[in-house]
Image (cartoon, rainbow, N blue to C red):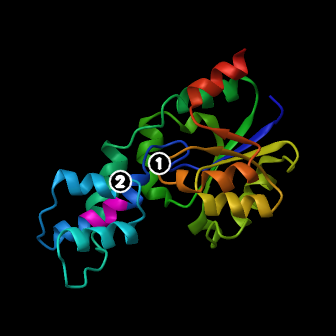
Amino acid sequence: MNFSYAIFDLDGTLLDSMTYWRNNIALFAVKEKGYSVSKQTEEKTYGMYADKAMALLRCELNITEDIPFSSNYREAVLRPTYENIIEPKPHAIEFLRLLKAKGIKMCLATATDRDLFMPAVKKHGMEEFFEFMITTSEVGKSKASSDIYDIALERLGGTKENTVVFEDAPYCINTASKAGYRIFAIDDDYSRYDRENTEKLCERYITDYGMFIKEILN
């Protein structure tokens, strides 16, 4: 391994959860208003951000009224989903275990609130891999700022030269790249649209943790 420290994003990077932060928000709002959405229409929204999914749903269902995103979504959907449904991305836990065995010090830096993600982290035994976990709400700035990465780096004790940031979201990758961080980008359905630009900014583009593990071990 050519790095000694790692800063991991969570959703879309370690957890296969982005659908609940994207198109599902629009689907929930429309259904909460009483509209019926066919499986075929739902599938058309897959991979879309919430606003684009809402636009598609309004067109498909001939909706003329304004439908705001529901304030109930966090408690009605996100909380039970993190507690019971969300799974790690394939081979993600195996990858974390390998890094720990090789002495890599790791932390979690996420935009998701701690009270939401902790049930999933505990359920899948991920706590043991991280020196600490930090969120944007605790930092006070979104990932449009590099503050969360800077604070994580300082707490880990690494440098930008010997630390890698694992991220999936293009805007986060842009932020970290501009701040001088090494990026290992993780492929995800909701970030793949900007893959060409992402590959220009990252040191590695990982499409599959399992394949990457084999590469490391060989």
The amino acid pointed to by label 2 is Tyr
Q: Classify mark 2: helix, strand or loop.
A: loop
Residue in the picture at 19% in, 51% down:
39
Horizontal side of residue 157 vs 70, given as left or right: right
Q: Residues within 10 Å of mark 1 (few under 14, many from 20)?
A: some
Residue in the picture at 17% in, 66% down:
31
Residue in the picture at 61% in, 31% down:
96
Q: Earlier in the sequence, mark 1 or mark 2?
A: 2
Q: Main secondary structure of the magenta part?
A: helix
Q: Which mark is residue 68?
A: none
Q: Residues within 10 Å of mark 2 (few under 14, many from 20)?
A: some
The amino acid pointed to by label 1 is Asp
Q: Classify mark 1: helix, strand or loop.
A: loop
How far from the left and from the top, in percent, is residue 192?
54, 50
User: Which residues lie in the magenta part?
Assistant: 23-27
Name the residue tied to disc 2: 46
Name the residue tied to disc 1: 189
